[in-house]
Amino acid sequence: MNSVIALIGSGSTALSFIHHYLQQLEAGAALPRTMYLFEKRAAFGSGAAYEADRASNLLNTKTEFITPFIDQPGDFWHWLQTQPALWRHQFPGYTLEADGYAPRPLFGMYLEDRLKALVKRAASLGLNVVQLHAEVLDIQQHGNRQVLNTDCNLRLVADYVFLTCGTLPAKRNNALAEHPHVLNTPYPVSTLPARIPAEAAVGILGARLSAIDAVIALIEQGHRGPITLHSRSGYFPSVRGTQGRIQPRYLSDEYLATLRASKGKLSLQELIALVQKEIMELEGTELRGDFHLPAPPASLENYLQDEIHAAAGPRAWQAALYATNPIIDQLWAALHEEDKQKFLDNYFSAFMAYRVSIPVENARKILRYLQSGQLRFCSGSFGRPQAMDGGLVLRMDGEQIVHHYDYLIQAMGSPRQVGHLESELLSRLLQRGVLQPHPLGGVKIEAHSYCAEGANGQTNPRFRVLGELTTGAFFFTSALDINARHAKRCVEQFATVFTPAAKDIEAAQA
Ligand SMILES: Cc1cc2nc3c(=O)[nH]c(=O)nc-3n(C[C@H](O)[C@H](O)[C@H](O)COP(=O)(O)OP(=O)(O)OC[C@H]3O[C@@H](n4cnc5c(N)ncnc54)[C@H](O)[C@@H]3O)c2cc1C
C-alpha cells in the first residue's frame, strides 16, 4: 500500500497546504500519493470565513494582496480580472478595485475554483486527492495507522493526519442553547431575515467583524427593530487607512534575531518598544513619552467619525502592525512566558481592535446606523442571557441595568480555549489525550514540525495541526497569509522527515 495522508478540513489553509505539497512533488519529493481531503460543509475550498453568503461580508485585506499562495502575490486580483464569467453574474454590483475590499463569498468562489485546479494538477503529478464530503468524528491510532471515523459511518485508514479544521464555533453550553430566539452564530447572514422578524429588538454579543457583518446584513435586508451591540471590553475595530505594505526595518527576521542574540527573551515593554520604533521610523518622528494603551471609545459615534477621517490617509501604526504578520509567531516566541499571559489578559482586546481593522465602507454604514438611532453600542461585561416573560434579558455585571431583547445573536468569534469549541472530533481527541489544551489557547504542538503533543508529553510524528488551533503556540492565527505561511513550512518540514515506503518510491518514479 502507498502511504496515505488525511487533511481534516478544506478551507484556505488546506488549499495552501496542497499548493506547497504539489511544489514538493514537482521538485521530486517522494511524498504519499494518496490524500484524503475531508470537508463537512457543502463546498470544498472556501471554509468558514469565505462561505457563500451576502456580498456585504467584506474581506479585511485588500484585493491586490490577499491570496492563499504566498509565492503568487496578486493571484486573487488576477483571477478576478481574467475569469469574470465565473463570478460576475453572482456579484453584479461589485466594482473591481485593486486596493478595495472584495466580498468574502466572492473570495470563497475563487478558493473553490483554485482548489479544483489544484486537484487536477495533483492528478497529473500522480497524487490522488480524494475529496470526502463528511465530518470526521474521531481518529484512533492503531500502531502507525490512523483510523478515521466519519458521521456517515465511513471508516478510512491514513498514515499521517493534518488537522486543518480552522475556525470552530463556541460550544452551546448554557440553558438557552436550544432557545429558538438565540442564534449561536450570525452566519450565513443571508438567512437572518428568515430567522428574525423585522421589528424584533436584537442584541448582538460581540463587536468585532462578525458582529459588524450581522448588523449590516440585518439592516440592509430590511430589519426595522432596534439593534444593540454588546462589547465586553468596550473596544471597536479601527478603520483601515490608505497605506500599502511596508518593508519593516525593526520588525524583521534579522533585527529580531540580533535582538534575541543580545537579550534572550523579551519583555512586553521591549516588544512594544520595538513596534513603536517601527512606527516612529515610518512617521519620521521621535518617541514622545511612554506607551499608553488607548482607552475604549467613550462615544462610538465620535470614535468612528475620527477613524473615518483618519482613514482617508496612510496610517503608520497600522502599516507597522500589519508588518508583524511574517514574524508574529517569532515575536510571540521571543516573549517571556509570564508576559504572554499578561498580554492576553490586559492587551488582547485592544490589540484585536487595532490590528483587525475594518474597511471605511463598513465604518460609514455603522456610523449611519448609530446616527439614525437604530443601532446602539453598549460596553461592559454581562452575565449569561436568560429567558424571561417571553423575551430574553441580559444583565450587565455589577450594575442594575438589564437589557430586554426578542432575539440574541452570539457573534464573539471562536474561543481561544479549545475545550470551549464545538467539535465532536476535538472533544474525543482531547478526552483520550491525543491532543492537549495549550494554556494560551488551541492545542499543544511542537512549533517547528507542527506535530501534536499528547497528554503523555510526547509529540506525535503522525499527527500535525495547522491554523486557528495553533493559536497558543503562534498567538495570531486569524489571518489567511499567516496560515498560508505555516502551511508552507509544515509541508516543507514533513517532506524532510517523511520516509517513503518502497511503494511510494515506485509511485514517485512512475
Ligand atoms: C468570519 C471570518 C472572517 C474572516 N475574514 C478574514 C479576512 O478578511 N482576511 C483574513 O486574512 N482572514 C480572515 N479570517 C481568518 C480566517 O479564518 C483565516 O484567514 C483562514 O482563512 C482560515 O482558514 P482555515 O482553512 O484554517 O479555516 P476555515 O476557513 O475555518 O476552514 C476549515 C474547514 O474545516 C472544516 N472542518 C472542521 N472540522 C471538520 C471535521 N471534523 N470534519 C470535516 N471538516 C471539518 C470546516 O467546515 C471548514 O470548512 C476570517 C475569519 C472569520 C471566521
Image (spheres, rainbow, N blue to C red):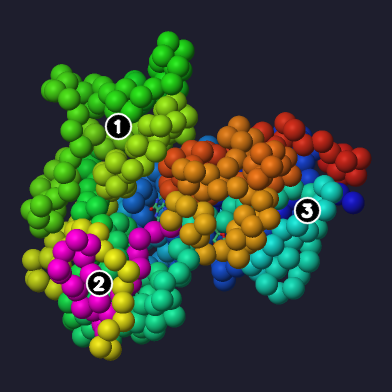
Residue pointed to by mark 1: 320
First-in-chain label (2 vs 1):
1
Amino acid type at circle 1 is Ala
Residue 229 sits in quarter: bottom left
Q: In the image, which residues are magenta?
A: 391-414
Using the rendered image of the protein, determine whether residue 110 is visible from the camera's viewpoint. Answer: no
**Disc 1 from disc 3: Cα separation:** 44 Å
| Residue 185 screen position, x and y as percent | 40, 69
For image coordinates 20% across by 78% down, the residue present is 404
- Real-space Cα separation, disc 2 to disc 3, in angstroms: 45 Å
Where's the C terminus, which quadrant? Answer: top right
Mark 1 and mark 3 lie on one chain; the one further toward the N terminus is: 3
Give the residue drawn at x 45%, y 63%: 170
Tell me the amino acid under the disc marked 2. Answer: Leu
Where in the figure is residue 146, as x and y percent of width and height?
77, 54
In the shown orientation, is residue 317 left or right of residue 504? left
* Amino acid type indicated by mark 3: Gln
**What residue would you read off at disc 3?**
141
Instruction: Name, please, the residue furthest toward the top.
Output: 262
Helix, strand or loop at label 2? It is strand
User: Which mark lies nearer to you, 2 or 3?
Assistant: 2
Residue that badge 2 annotates: 394
User: Viewed as shown, does residue 479 lie left or right of 157?
Assistant: left
Q: Are marks 2 and 1 in contact (CB under 8 Å)?
A: no
Q: Position of residue 128 (x, y in %)?
A: 76, 55
